[in-house]
Amino acid sequence: MQTTIQLIVNNTPCEATVDTRTLLVDFLRDQLDLTGTHLGCATGNCGACTVMLDGLTVKACTILAADVAGSTVTTIEGWTQDARQSGDLHPIQAAFVKHHALQCGFCTPGMVLSVQQLLKEKPHPTEAEIRHGIAGNLCRCTGYASIVKAVQEIATTTSLSPGGRGLG
Amino acid sequence: MIRAPFQLHRPHSIDEAVRLLSQCVQNGEDVKLLAGGQSLMPSMNLGLVAPAHIVSLNHVAGLDSIRRDGDMLAIGAGTTHHALAESEVVQAHCPILSETAACIGDVQVRNRGTLGGSIGHFDPAADYPPVLVLLDAACQIVSPSGERTVAAKDVFVDYMTTSLSADEVLTEIRVPVLPSDTGTAYVKFTRVEGGFAIVGAGACLRLNPDNTCRSIRVGICGAAPVPVRLTAIEDTLTGKAVDDAFVEMVAAAAYESAHDPVAELHADADYKREMVRVFTRRAVKTAWERAD
């Protein structure tokens, strides 16, 4: 069964025809070529497919593309648009690089979005809150220690004031 | 992509959803309701479930409202775990429900998964059922012939089986506004953070001024295929002094009540029974600390 959906992806209105069986993650990767969103487990465990849906992180392998018609989706590509234009790394990206918070990088797009959501809700999280905030993203390389360090640094150094770069 | 084909329906009202469901049922076709999809979608991805029709509730407006209605809170079935955990009304008047919502899955799951979806799916290791049973929650259900209200304890019938029929939609869950001096706690035992509960225990405790028990309610998951409520010991202990011995009596009753734990990979039945004792003790102790 095919259906046509309209939604906003990375600030761009988009209309597409999808098979109703298409998962949001497959739609983003295969039809929109937004391959920054990864498909890991397809069971809602690993978090590699994390995207923002109407401003909240979700796992795109647990959502039908046809069921988010009318919604706003932001993927890692949309999130880094500003950084690519200015040439500067986003504070979360910079901290991940500095602290080696990634090795193979498969979990990183989802991890970064989860970190962003965490810091939006809790600008100065404790270590426990950081670990709680990224519990939905599995990383098999780092053992999480370096990710926690990166987030701790962002939380202590980044200005969240309207005039600052912020964590947008 | 999900392999098995299905028809997706996206109704805009409950009536339309019920009509679609009953059409499928009448035609003898397998139909599933889709709410947050945090259990259904993985099951379909794995090919464990392959309904011919999916009726999505994600386009029905107003299913996610939380409002106070006299001495009850009326919570829309489409309320997400995240919304429940963060709701100031729920935190103030039924904190055990927000504490429970906050420990389900992970951030992304809580952002999408819903209260009604969890009830309808009824994994026996889910966190809401024991809490709803101890709260004497009422479930509002719309069927083709009209509406009915069912007590939570009568919703959870057996392992992954509820008393809802295939052409019914759960729309609202009503829980009591707890008196502000109630101490409440929900604690769970999981293999990893946010996992399904191997055992979960919830407790609500009110004290009299002389530190005797004014009322106690305890609900447990993991002790049997359906939530267990410790009604007998709740009655016995009302009016008794609340002390460590009191807590042990509840924990012992919980152990005795764990007549049929569902053995699983990480916990056999005997182990679960022991954990029921341990986690009930923790729940009652914490509720006691929080009661004033």
Image (cartoon, grey):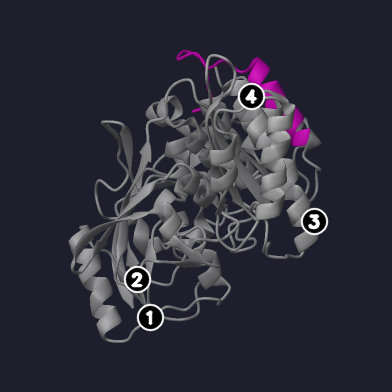
Task: Name the N-terminal-most of marks 1 and 4.
Answer: 1
Side of A78 where A124 appears, left or right: right
Identity of the amino acid at label 2?
A: Ser
Task: Name the N-terminal-most of marks 4 and 2.
Answer: 2
Q: CA distance from mark 2 to mark 1?
A: 12 Å
Q: Which residues are magenta?
A: A146-168
Side of B274 where A31 appears, left or right: left
Where is the C terminus of chain B found, in terms of image quarters?
top right
Query: Which element is circle 3 on?
Result: helix
Identify the subunit bearing mark 3.
B
Which residue lies at the image location 35% right of the left edge and 64% below the top edge?
Answer: A66
Q: Are marks 3 and 2 in contact (CB under 8 Å)?
A: no
Q: CA distance from mark 3 to mark 4?
A: 30 Å
Task: Name the N-terminal-most of marks 1 and 3.
Answer: 1
Query: Which element is circle 2 on?
Result: loop
Checking the image for residue A17, the label placed there is none
Identity of the amino acid at label 3?
A: Tyr
Identity of the amino acid at label 4?
A: Ala
Identify the subunit bearing mark 4.
B
For label 1, the residue is B30
Task: Name the N-terminal-most of marks 3 and 4.
Answer: 4
Checking the image for residue B271, the label placed there is 3
Which residue lies at the image location 54% right of the left edge and 46% below the top edge?
Answer: B231
Which residue lies at the image location 65% right of the left edge and 36% below the top edge?
Answer: B283
Identity of the amino acid at label 1?
A: Asp
For label 2, the residue is B165
